[in-house]
Image: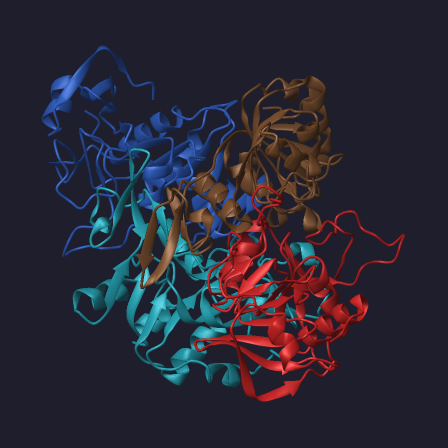
Chain colours: A blue, B red, C brown, D cyan
Amino acid sequence: MIQDKDRKREVIVKRVAKELKDGDLVNLGIGLPTQVVNFIPEGVDVLLHSENGFVGLGPTPKPGDEDKDIVNAGAQPASHVAGAAYFDSAMSFTIIRGGHLDVTVLGALQVDQKGNLANWMIPGKMVPGMGGAMDLVVGAKRVIVAMEHTAKGEAKILKQCNLPLTAAGEVDTIVTEMGVMKVTPQGLVLTEIAPETTVDEVISMTEADLIIAEDLKVMDV
Amino acid sequence: MIQDKDRKREVIVKRVAKELKDGDLVNLGIGLPTQVVNFIPEGVDVLLHSENGFVGLGPTPKPGDEDKDIVNAGAQPASHVAGAAYFDSAMSFTIIRGGHLDVTVLGALQVDQKGNLANWMIPGKMVPGMGGAMDLVVGAKRVIVAMEHTAKGEAKILKQCNLPLTAAGEVDTIVTEMGVMKVTPQGLVLTEIAPETTVDEVISMTEADLIIAEDLKVMDV
Amino acid sequence: MNKIKTLDQALDYIKDGMTIAVGGFLGVGTPEKLIDAVVAKGVKNITLICNDTAFPDKGVGKWVVNKNVSKVIISHIGTNPESGRQMNAGELEVELVPQGTLAERVRAAGAGLGGVLTPTGIGTIVEQGKQKLTIEGKDYLLELPLKADVALIKGSIVDKKGNAYYNKSTRNFNTLMATAADLVIIEAEKLVEVGEIDPTDVMTPSIFVDVIVE
Amino acid sequence: MNKIKTLDQALDYIKDGMTIAVGGFLGVGTPEKLIDAVVAKGVKNITLICNDTAFPDKGVGKWVVNKNVSKVIISHIGTNPESGRQMNAGELEVELVPQGTLAERVRAAGAGLGGVLTPTGIGTIVEQGKQKLTIEGKDYLLELPLKADVALIKGSIVDKKGNAYYNKSTRNFNTLMATAADLVIIEAEKLVEVGEIDPTDVMTPSIFVDVIVE
């Protein structure tokens, strides 16, 4: 089981990056998912969507090179690549909700074996709002949850989410530092396991019922 | 009663032009309404909306000055004034249906005393389609019908339209070569009468019940 | 990913019986080379989504004249006498849609909306067969999304990734149609390198465009 | 018609208790001078329609901190701790709306639509109190228009008639908000003569703009 925090995060983002295909239009959520961009394989050309209003999000500008009129969806200084396009919020969510986004990668507070996702509020405690998350999860062709497997030792992958949902039954894939899980009509299937990790460890850290794939692989990270 | 065809049309468009106020955004329908632009009073600055996608429609260009990329809603060569703006069809009808258009001027096959309008089809005979007319009549703040009072001697201003409607109860004002009529909760009121025309003549050419305004004026045309 | 194709290659995507959305308003902003290629190929039984049937010798009007189309979903056919003749003769099915409603139905398909409520058509035969909803005392028609297999659009300036810019009144339905089709073919009046269109000025983002022809 | 006013004159249109729509995304594309002037005037009980409450020292976040706002209709408040604190203390009413739904609700108001059907929020607490419709076997929520008394927007380049151009990612909700308010005040980053913005490149037509401040 991987213990080092940085290594955990690296495993997650490296593995998520391998899910992306050449030509994909991808939205990377704030926080951990953002870092996926640094590990996209050679020869895979993806276009990044920024829900504040453009496709073609580029790397973070160097200090001094910032343009006050270019920020990402977290209001951090950003840049655009050649061939980018800016538009208004209606078009931004036409792209998202209309099924034009190939992949969305988001974090989660909880996710369950039916593909339900909760990532926008803890009643009475933290209510940041859903922002664009509900549209992203409903609209994207593929929804990948990228997160640490547990929070303070508590399972986040559950039989049934008990926090308010972001969307019902929309999650396709969960990538954590312990493995890769796919939501299928039969249930949640562990398809890959992280290096230095045992199936029993994954099961003990997961509240959801896990189906272990017959051809279980080791994550290539 | 005015008999000359050209004089009839001139009376109509001159009188309609006086309905426009400084700052109005106006859509002029194809045909007779288009000519209203030539009679707008001094000091009245109106902006013309063209439903194919711009505000700031300008005069017809001189032969040789045409721009293939600028046409009006009838596909005729057009121009734009300074301060014009082009947009797509969704925005064009956001303006129309959203109540941002001050006045629409259209022709009619029939109009009735309840403000119903029929101007887009004669079943089995002529079905050009409604184009933008249904949206214009529903969306504009004021709907002015500009037309000859009769067609081949037949009344066009009726108790009840019998052709398929363009919209129900949306017409505000009717301007013909015989007078000006307003649709009110009490019924259709003749507020102005054309020069060389008698009230009896108007009544005889109108199938609708006409209320004659107590302060009936002569059209200033 | 090279999206630039010959007209012949682009035509491979267009089959008999497809629903095809075409940009343009009375032929302005319509991809005439693609229109002509469809005529030359002799594609049959197209269901056409377009603002109008243009003129007999311009835009999609040529498809009507050449019998490529069996149904039109359209706001206006009055400028093309052949459309009316075929309709009256039972040769062409015509579904008339108010122009603003057409724009919203296509947009709804592109934007993943299940429908929109419009006041347009209330009290008219456009109501027929449609659900009516009352919101704050006002009646609206529920209008449903309109999606195509292929969209054919025309850009004044198009870069090699497919970003498009429409000059003046040529924009009309082009971006809308591009959002609402499984495959989008754009005809470039002027093809430029990636980066030559300022990203702020792009009107159809490249992500909607699959095939570019010159 | 001269739309150009001083900040003081513009503020005359803004009264206690109004519903005010403000452009911007986390403060980018927000008219900061107008925001500051509202704070200085001490306007109270604003119902704010905006994407987010930005930051305590930026954009509409300043209205939250200075207690100009009693209710927000918004997609996100997480970047401004004061919003959450006031909400939990019962000082600020918060109506959370998914961002895409917010855009569509504002657009519907501006476009004269009675509502739109969106799949977003199905199966979540966003469903509460809303009508659900099933179209071709898929569930949608009926989301209603959202209209403001006043919209405050920010243009990168604005001409003296009110035509506006937004640079890069500053566009976001600005045009949408402008379509859905009884009165629209635009803050021009750069004010230019009529005709200096190419009509093809205008992003908010002047017809939506009532007042221009520099």
On screen, B105 above or below A153? below
* Quadrant hosting residue A162: top left
The residue depicted at 63 percent of the width and 20 percent of the height is C43
The residue depicted at 54 percent of the width and 21 percent of the height is C17
The answer to whether residue A21 is visible is: yes
On screen, A32 above or below D107? above
Residue nearest the observer in this picture, D134 or D206: D134
Task: Give residue B54's position: percent from left, percent from top.
Answer: 65, 57
The answer to whether residue A61 is visible is: no
The residue depicted at 83 percent of the width and 58 percent of the height is B61
Residue nearest the observer in this picture, C160 or A39: C160
Total numbered badges shown on the rendered structure: 0
Residue nearest the observer in this picture, D148 or D154: D148
* Quadrant hosting residue A174: top left
Give the farthest residue toward the right: B64
Give the farthest residue toward the bottom: B215
* Quadrant hosting residue C202: top right
Quadrant of the image containing the N terminus of chain B: bottom right
Image-based side of D103 in relation to B55, left or right: left
The residue depicted at 68 percent of the width and 75 percent of the height is B178
Task: Give residue B124's position: percent from left, percent from top.
Answer: 58, 41
Task: Give residue A66's position: percent from left, percent from top.
Answer: 54, 53
Quadrant of the image containing the C terminus of chain B: bottom right
Task: Give residue D207's position: percent from left, percent from top.
Answer: 59, 67
Image-based side of A98 in relation to C62, left or right: left
Image-based side of C33 in relation to D166, left or right: right
